[in-house]
Amino acid sequence: MVSIVFQDFTHYAVTLKENITMGDNMRYDELKLRKIVSQIGLTDLVNKLNHAIETPLGKAREGGVDISGGEWQKIALSRLLYKCSEINILDEPTASLDPIAEGKVYELFGNINKDKFTLYITHRLGAAKIASEILVVNNGRIEERGSHDQLMADSEGLYKKMFENQQSWYS
């Protein structure tokens, strides 16, 4: 019912395929796996690995391959997509990704998770724009609540101040 991707996720010393299907490998679906690999942007990784999707990851197994933090993060996100849970929790799910990959992941999740309950925990407020409802937590309390547009309309609001501050980093 529930899938979670933490900011500090686990690197499993198993094959790429097993990393993605873990938690739902009793219902293996090759077409679904290939689609997710493509959607999340792992096709280039699969193509460069000696044994493609059957390549062991990490150095714990013979023939294992080290991959980048961003690739590990995409694998963790792929695992969540493969599982097809009704409730998804993503805690800073793109922390290891570059801004372009991050934008693609949020666009993908916005399209795929339309009919699911998804909770995004993020400090990157550009990503919060895709949420139907944003909760701004300050000192352990919900300080503001609303859509991006509603929160931006409050000229004195904390969300607006934080969003504009982050936006200035990219100007």
Image: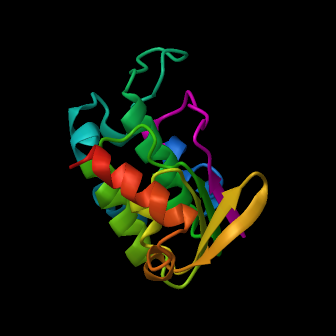
* Residue farthest along the right direction in this orientation: 140
Identify which residue is drawn at 31% across, 58% down.
103
In the image shown, does 143 or 94 lie closer to the viewer? 143
User: Residue 98 location in percent, x, y?
Assistant: 30, 41
In the image shown, does 26 or 138 lie closer to the viewer? 138
Identify which residue is drawn at 48% across, 35% down.
15
User: Can residue 160 be seen from the camera position used here?
Assistant: yes
Identify which residue is drawn at 47% across, 72% down.
155
Query: What range of the chain is rendered magenta?
Result: 1-17
Coloration mode = rainbow
User: Residue 51 location in percent, x, y?
Assistant: 31, 32
Q: Is residue 146 left or right of residue 67?
A: right
Is residue 111 a member of the stretch shown in magenta? no
In the image shown, does 126 or 14 lie closer to the viewer? 126
Identify which residue is drawn at 41% across, 17% down.
63
User: Residue 134 location in percent, x, y?
Assistant: 57, 72
Is residue 8 a member of the stretch shown in magenta? yes
- Say which quarter of the image contains residue 1: bottom right
Q: Is residue 104 left or right of residue 22?
A: left
User: Residue 55 location in percent, x, y?
Assistant: 39, 31
Q: Is residue 3 above or below residue 87?
A: above
Give the overall secondary structure of the magenta segment.
Answer: loop
